[in-house]
Amino acid sequence: MSQRPPPPSWPRQVALVLQKDWAIELSSGEVLITSGFFALLVVVLSSMAYFGGPRTTQTVAAGALWLSVSFALVLSLGKSWARERQGHALEGLLLTPLSPSALFAGKTLGLIVFLFLVEAVVTPLTVLFFSIDLFEVAPGLSLIALLLTPGIAAFGTLFGALLVRTRARDLALSIVIFPLLAPALLTAIAATRALLTKAPLSDLSGYLTLLALFDGIAWGGGLGMFGKLIED
């Protein structure tokens, strides 16, 4: 009898999950268009409703930017995990030799790419609508985004999988996710506000350290707990 071929390596499994998710998204564009448009709408409405001149720029712009990203995250999680629920796709994945940690990492990396695309569009519009010098704040905003995005994507993937089987998953996801993401979002908003008030990058080291710690907790918990959550 011929031996069964060994399963792909862990990095290859991660790449296959990432490739699957983005092949579906590129063919439909459902998640990117819907969530990206909603994030843009949040920024536009915030600039129209709350902009009151230079005095309020630092207060409102930071919140508008990262809250729009968080709303896009929740919408994208609901839609992407709904795909896994349709036709029992998630159960099919669990029957393969795919490692649960590889499934978590692949879906999280796909979500990170999506959020970076949203941020690449939302950030220039935010600085435009709130009359901020993009070239002055671009390095700091990029650093904040690089540290914030992996953590919120990891937490989102972890609890998106936990709630995928619930009927009111969108409502439940919002109720669960936002309190968990609040420390990271508030840290990013505070760091961005300091950046907009001309604070040097060295003054943001405390905020950036907290975001890096949040990333480590999110990824460590996700890689360790994801398999148990989806099996239950």
Image (spheres, grey):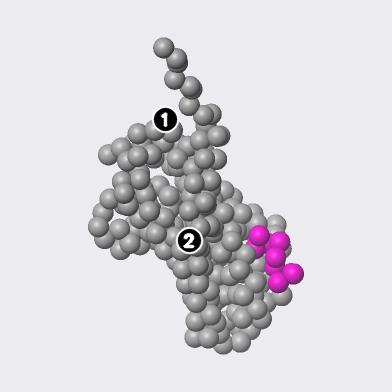
Quadrant where the C terminus is found in the figure = top left
Of mark 2 and mark 1, the one earlier in the sequence is: 2
Compared to 157, does 232 lie above or below?
above
Give the residue at x 44% y 60%. 76
Q: Which residues are magenta?
A: 134-142
Residue 224 in sight from this viewpoint:
no
Q: With 77 as the anchor, is 59 left or right in this view?
A: right
Q: Position of residue 59 (x, y in %)?
A: 55, 76
User: Principal SS element in the magenta part?
Assistant: helix
Q: Whole-Å distance between the Cαs marked 2 and 1?
A: 28 Å
Name the kind of residue labelled 1 in the image. Pro
> Which of the pair 199/169 is nearer the observer?
169
Give the residue at x 58% y 58%. 116
Circle 1 packing at 10 Å, graded few (<14), some (14-19), many (20+), is few
Name the kind of residue labelled 2 in the image. Ser
User: Decide: marks 2, 1 in contact (CB < 8 A)?
Assistant: no
